[in-house]
Image (spheres, helix red, strand yellow):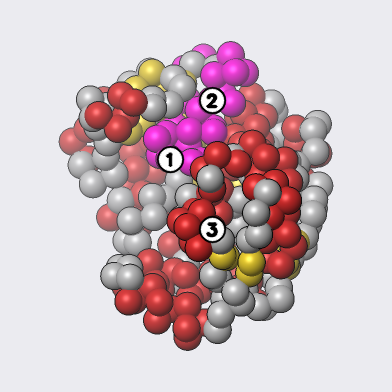
Amino acid sequence: MGAILVTGASGTVGRAVAAALVSAGESVVSAVRNPAGSEFALNPPAGTPRAFDFADPTGWDGAFSGVDRLFLLRPPAIANVADTLIPVIDTALERGIRQIVFLSLQGVQFNPATPHHAVEKHLRLRRAPYTFLRPNFFMQNLSTVYRDGIREQGEIYLPAARARTAFVDARDIGRVAARVFTEPGHLRTAYTLSGEQSLNYDQVAEILSEVLGRRITYARPSSGDYLARLAEQGAPADFIAVQKMIYRVVRLGVSAFPNRAIRRLTGEPATTFRQFAADHRDVWL
C-alpha cells in the first residue's frame, strides 16, 4: 500500500489530518510549499515533508511518487480552482490514485458560487474515488483568525447576530479523515461534520470568560460595520468578500444544526467548545 499525500499539511486542518494518519500507522507525505523554510523547520507537521505547490505543475509528478491516496484541500488564497485544484485532481487520477478525500464546505451542494462546488462537481464528472468532508465552522478560527480581538480587546467582533453555530474542532476532522482513509465503505460518499452543541456567540464569550478567568464580550456588530472595520484594517478584498458570505450564511441559520457524524465515524464524541478553549487557552493570554 502506498502513502497518503496530505496537501496543506502546515495549516490547521492539514496538520491535524497528517497527525491522525501517522497515529493510525499510515505512511504520510506532508505536502508544503517550502520544506526548507524557517517556519516549517520550527513547527513541522507529521509525516515525511515533500515540496508541493498548486501553482507549479512541474513538481506534481514528484509529489505523487509512491502515493496512492490524496487528502485535498483548497488553500484560502486560491479562488480559481480551474487552474489549480482541477489539474491536480486530473494528475492524481492519471497516476492511479485510489481515493481522494476532499475538504469541502457545509451546504456546498446548495451554493454553486463556491470554489468547493466546482471541485465536487469535477470529481463526480470524472467518476473519481472521492470522499467529501463538509465541515461546519472551525473552532480554530477563534484561536487564529479572530485571536487578536479576543486577546487584546477582550471582544468577539463578528456579525453573527444571535445565530447559533455547531462549531467543529479541526482535530476531529483529522480523526474522521484517518477513518475514511483506512476503513472500507467511504468511497463516493459525503459527510456533513458538525459539533454536537449549537452555541451563539454570547455563549462562546461566556465559555471563554470562564476558561480565561477574565471577561470576554460579544459585540454583535452589523455586517456593514464589520466589513468596514476589515477594510480600515487593510484586509484584502477577497478576504472581506469571504467574510461577508460566511456570516450571511451563519445569520440564516445554516450552521446551527448539530449532528453526531463525528461520533458515528470515529466512535468518539465531537470535542466540545469548552474543551477546545481549555486546550488552547494560552493563545488568548
Element at label 1: loop
Q: Which residue is mark 3?
A: 150
Residue 135: which numbered mark, if any?
none
- Distance between the alpha carbons at the discs numbered 1 and 3: 21 Å
140 versus 280 height, above or below = below
Q: In the image, residue 281 lies at what x, y percent?
A: 60, 41
Q: Which residue is mark 1?
A: 11
Residue under the point 47% across and 70% down: 243
Element at label 2: helix
Magenta stretch, residue numbers: 1-25
Which corner quadrant of the image does residue 280 belong to? Answer: top right
Which comes sooner in the sequence, label 2 or label 3? 2
Q: Amino acid at mark 1?
A: Gly
Q: Nearer the viewer, mark 1 or mark 3?
A: 3
In terms of depth relative to the viewer, which is nearer, 42 or 255? 42
Residue 17 inside the magenta-drawn segment: yes
Q: Amino acid at mark 3?
A: Ile
Which corner quadrant of the image does residue 77 belong to? Answer: bottom left
29 versus 138 height, above or below = above
Element at label 3: helix
Q: Which residue is mark 2?
A: 19
- Distance between the alpha carbons at the discs numbered 2 and 1: 12 Å
Q: Residues within 10 Å of mark 3 (few under 14, many from 20)?
A: many
Residue under the point 50% across and 28% down: 18
Residue under the point 34% across and 76% down: 231
Q: Amino acid at mark 2?
A: Ala
